[in-house]
Image (tube, rainbow, N blue to C red):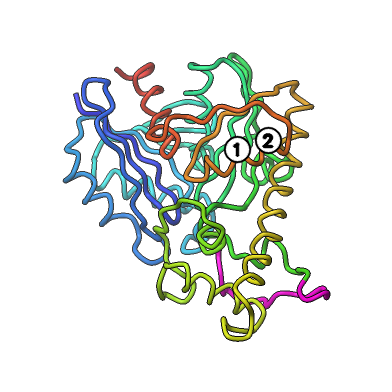
Amino acid sequence: MRVLTLDIGGANTKYALFLNNKFKKSRIIYNPVWKKGVISVLRKIKKETRPNIIAATFTAELSDVFEDKEKGVVKLVDACKKIFKKVYFLSVDKELVESITEPRKLAAANFVASVYYLEKKFNEGILLDMGSTTTDIVPFKRGKILYFKTDLERLMNGQLVYIGFLRTPLNTIKNTIRFRNRDIRLAGEYFAITADLFRILGYKLKYICETPDRMGKDRRSCLRRVARLLCSDVYEVKEEEIVNICTQIKEEIIRSISEPLKKISKNYKINKAYLAGIGAEFLREICEESGLDYYVLDKKIAENLPCIGLHEIVKDEVL
């Protein structure tokens, strides 16, 4: 039995394949829905995996190619059914459904699969998952629902921070920096992203998304893009000054995630976080700053946790 689980995001489509309940492989495919749609990537995945059972979850419904979330969910469901015929879809109520009577319950439900996996394995804790675009901070205790069910509620309550390891424009994180003994407001343009910052600061990462200028992904190119935030270039701004800018923005990233993390830890009386996502290693620093115990999930699980968790739900409810 070949089980395929899908996590269809706006920028990346992820999948995991299981053969007779054993993990076989997974992939993260850069597929900007606003440019390419999802039909072609789903066809490619079907050809690669030849599945018998398919389950899917989404976050791509928020893409601005869709008029609203409900229409986005409907179009994503239709695309999945066109390629795979029979598909199970995950709702925020931890249920697998085949027909959609309440489309909004399928919106942004991928974190629910992650929580399901962690509840089974660890009973209680905080999911701390940094992907390319966002960071989830979700408390869990087996048998209880501690999470909010819409992205708006999650943003309002600190369970979702819209900062990711790759795609976040740097000037949306911190728009004023200290430079040559002055406070300078950064240019309000799409010049540099978190992938540039983390590459400059020496973190290991797969720069799978497009660059803002569609140029190189080497360190020199990253330095050039960050320099543009000061309406400048690498000949006007020294490398150590660019590194300092990145360090200031990194400190703001840590603060933006650690503050809600500490609040959630205190409110729910949970002192251990489980780290996932492509930014899992960076999240160590945030836990250390927050004074929390932490456990870094195995890499093959951490980078594709929603698909791994979705398989657990399929195993329990379908197989």
The answer to which of 183 and 236 lies nearer the viewer is 236
Give yes or no for contact between labels 1 and 2 (Cβ–Cβ under 8 Å).
yes
Position of residue 236 in the picture relative to residue 131 (left or right): right
Mark 1 closeness class: few <14, some 14–19, many ≥20 residues within 10 Å = many
Name the one closer to the observer, 312 or 61: 312
Q: Is residue 56 above or below residue 126?
A: below
> Which label number is shown at residue 176?
none
Amino acid, disc 2: Glu
Position of the N terminus by quadrant: top left
Q: Is residue 191 magenta?
A: yes
For image coordinates 46% across by 26% down, the residue present is 95
Identify the magenta region.
Answer: 179-193
On the rendered image, what quadrant is the C terminus found in? top left
Residue indicated by mark 1: 284
Is 90 positioned to the left or the right of 92 in the image? Answer: left
Disc 1 marks which amino acid?
A: Arg
Q: Residue at x 40, y 47 (%)?
A: 8
Asked which quadrant contains residue 270, the reply is: top right
Mark 1–mark 2 distance (CA, rounded to whole Å) = 6 Å
Residue, disc 2:
288
